[in-house]
Amino acid sequence: MAKVKTNAMRILDTQKVPYEILTYDSKDGKIDGVAVVGKIGRDASQVYKTLVAVGASKNLYVFVIPVEAELDLKKAAKEAGEKKVEMLPVKDIQKFTGYIRGGCSPIGMKKNYPTFLDESAQVLDTIIVSAGKIGFQVELTPDQLLNTSTGKYGQLTK
């Protein structure tokens, strides 16, 4: 068990959600999702990244998509019920989520933003997402992630 407990892990513990902690070395600065896949030795289809976008209404939305995929902003806007969405600037991520780029978990943000998990996760037994700190990932079922983040599935990728 990791000695580090992130906010995301504490929330999972509180809700009695079973999860596995995966760690990786981030000293080389390679913290993008594809690099993380290689470091944790898992299939890329199982590893998801967390993206935060802002809608035309100025509301924030969380989109969780496969690390090798690209967020389709039009599809994301439709799922969120917005005319359009654009990525939240990196400089604003910590202010709104409490997390930093490369360590942004869909679980345990400062506020419970509407969260959407790419529908591709529905066929997987488990998915891996950031645990809220660079070097730490958590593995859990897609439904457990949605229940913990009060999210829903959606068509999000190109």
Image: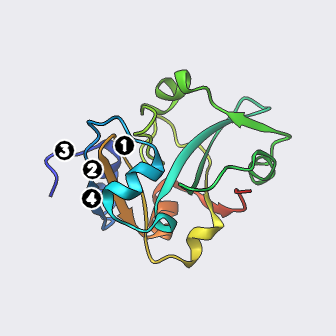
Mark 1 or 2: the one toward you: 2
Q: Pick the quarter of the image with the C terminus.
A: bottom right
Counting other residues with Cα less than 10 Å from the Cα at mark 3, is it few (<14), some (14-19), or many (20 or more)? few
Above/below status of 133 relative to 106: above
Pointer 2: what residue? 24
Pointer 1: what residue? 132
Instruction: Return the residue nearer the eye: 42 or 56.
Output: 42
Q: In terms of sequence position, does the residue under pointer 3 or pointer 4 come before the other?
A: 3
Tell me the CA gap for discs 3 and 4.
Answer: 10 Å
What type is the residue that disc 2 sits on? Tyr
Counting other residues with Cα less than 10 Å from the Cα at mark 1, is it few (<14), some (14-19), or many (20 or more)? many
| Residue at disc 3, secondary structure | loop
Tell me the CA gap for discs 4 and 2.
Answer: 10 Å
Pointer 4: what residue? 21
Q: Position of residue 139 (x, y in %)?
A: 36, 63
Colour scheme in use? rainbow
Q: Position of residue 116 (x, y in %)?
A: 62, 55
Viewed as shown, does residue 125 lie left or right of 66? Answer: left
Q: In terms of sequence position, does the residue under pointer 1 or pointer 2 come before the other?
A: 2
Residues under numbered marks 4 and 2 in contact, where contact means CB atoms less than 8 Å apart: no
What type is the residue that disc 4 sits on? Ile
Pointer 3: what residue? 4
Tell me the CA gap for discs 1 and 2.
Answer: 13 Å
Q: In terms of sequence position, does the residue under pointer 3 or pointer 2 come before the other?
A: 3
> What residue is rendered at 76% in x and 54% in y?
79
Residues under numbered marks 3 and 1 in contact, where contact means CB atoms less than 8 Å apart: no
